[in-house]
Image: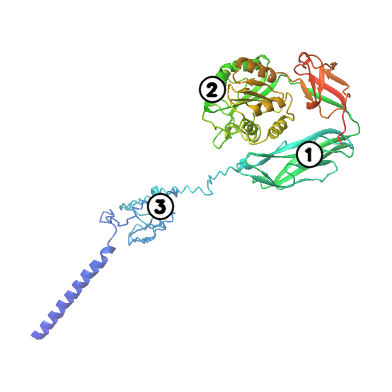
Amino acid sequence: MECHRRIKLYLWVQWIVVIGSLILVFGACTNDLKPLHDKNGADTDVDTDTDVDTDTDADTDTDADTDTDADTDTDVDTDTDTDADTDTDMDTDTDVDTDTDVDTDTDADTDTDADTDADTDTDADTDTDADTDTDVDTDTDADTDTDTDTVRYGDLVPVPNSIDFGDVMMGCHSDFISARIINRGSKSRVISAVYLAKDFSDSFQFTTQGGSGPWVVPPFGEWVVEARFSPQSNGEISDELLLYSNDPVSAEISISLRGQGVNSSIRTDVFHQPEDGSADVLFVVDNTPSMMDEQYVLAENFPVFINRAISLGITFHIGVTTTDVDEGGERGALVAKEGNPRIITRDTPDIERVFGDNIKVGTLGSGIEQGLEAARLALGPDLLIPLEDGGNQGFVREEAKLAVIVVSDEDDGSPLSLDEYAESFRRIKGTLAGEKFTFHAIVATGEDCGTTGKRYIDIAHASDGTVQDLCGDWSSTLEQIADKVFTLPREFRLSHEPVEGSIAAVEVNGSQVDPGTGGDTGWTYVGSIRSIVFGKDDTPPAGAEIRVMYKAACIE
């Protein structure tokens, strides 16, 4: 009996040991499974959740805390919560707070997502996700795609985009008229084909610069196509000149062509004198170290120049650029002191001070002065770029005379030949020598004031402009240029070459004007510029109508 008792006692002791061991093991195993909240629901779990869920993704993921971030956070809360906010913790988070956000991640975050966790889940796991989820998720991809690839400056633009040849006698040709294809972008563009849309090759013909294609138009450069009209019948004939290129904006460029075939060679050209004179004046100023004094002298004497325009009632545009066309230089863009307009007009307040500020262009420019190239850029590609984007759009007006005034103590170092620059300037107004365009040089004419500006002097002479010595009387210099620039036009270019001696009549407001002898009265015909030129005393008044009757020569 005693033996039985001992055996039973032994077995009880063994059970107690086993049960005790099981309790210890179970306690150890379940230690990690203890509730996430203390009796007050304070979530005492320091939540090894090391991510402090700082969720630093730049992405401001405005998910109003629907907590949609990749943070699928289904954490089984082994609570290593390693999410680098991919929060892969599988955190099933069984606590009562059913924490239904896909990311049942009850990390305090006060995670108000669908997170119904009543106990505010204050764990250190501050999980700032959208909570503060700074995911800036501004996601600028397509959303705001701020990629402003300024392709618009890569367009090839025809200037002009239409040509009217006027009346041409059947069996004869018109003059060739040029259209410039200007590349206003920073990449070369290739024109692969040029042809007539209607293929009326018997009525319109064209030639291309550089022979057969393809043709490369360099950045900020130009390419020229010329067309003429050869009517084979009476009446209006029209066509389009089409150019195909790798232009990113439009692969097809169109220039409309029009002409009137007539069976008589008698012409009457009609002109209208503007109500007031108008002139656009571009100053190209050398901005190298040796030119500081000249810039100040030019500013001091400017009143002589501008007062002449104001006294004559002339409307004007005045702009300033420099001889620096290197990378980082002005490259023909108009310049102005901060706060000043880049185009000065009659309405500009305190005009003398503004010009004085703008003309002081400094002395840090390139040592290779390229005044002709600067003028070409200023009056070519830059004219197509808006002022606010650094271009000169609006500076040159169709009806206004155009003058370029270069001020430099060195000769021109531009890359093109004088003939190429002369042709480029001629295309702007249709003539090089004449009142519509003049080039003026204030340069060293000897060795006393620097290197003789021979190339500038040659262009000035070719355009019937003036040449003034840099060391001369600046007041007199500017007065002479003003007299040339700020006057009502006296020259009127005929639409056709007249047969010699065929000009039958020249009328101003219906009254015939007698021919002169080249002095201050009457009119003369100047063949080199194909123009009727009035003497100073017979200049047609503002608003006048001028009519010229003649017989047109046939160009065969």
Q: Could you tell me if the residues under marks 1 and 2 are in contact, i.e. CB atoms within 8 Å? A: no
Screen quadrant of the C terminus: top right
Residue picked out by circle 3: 113
Q: Is mark 1 on a helix, strand or loop?
A: strand
- The local crowd at label 3, few if under 14, some if 14 to 19, many if 20 or more residues have their Cα within 10 Å, is many
Q: Which amino acid does label 1 sit on?
A: Ala
Spot the residue most to the front. 447
Q: Locate residue 12 relative to residue 277 in the image: left or right.
A: left
Of badges 3 and 2, the one in the foreground is 2
Residue picked out by circle 2: 357
Residue picked out by circle 1: 227
Q: Is mark 3 on a helix, strand or loop?
A: loop
Screen quadrant of the N terminus: bottom left
Q: Position of residue 211 (x, y in %)?
A: 74, 44
Mark number, residue 338: none
- Residue 460 visible within the image: yes
Q: Mark 1 or 2 closer to N-term?
A: 1
Q: Could you tell me if the residues under marks 3 and 2 are in contact, i.e. CB atoms within 8 Å? A: no
Q: Which amino acid does label 3 sit on?
A: Asp
Q: Position of residue 364 (x, y in %)?
A: 51, 30
Using the numbered discs, state the Cα–Cα distance from disc 1 to disc 3 in whole angstroms: 72 Å
Q: Mark 1 or 3 closer to N-term?
A: 3
Q: What residue type is labelled 2?
A: Asp
- Residue 399 visible within the image: no
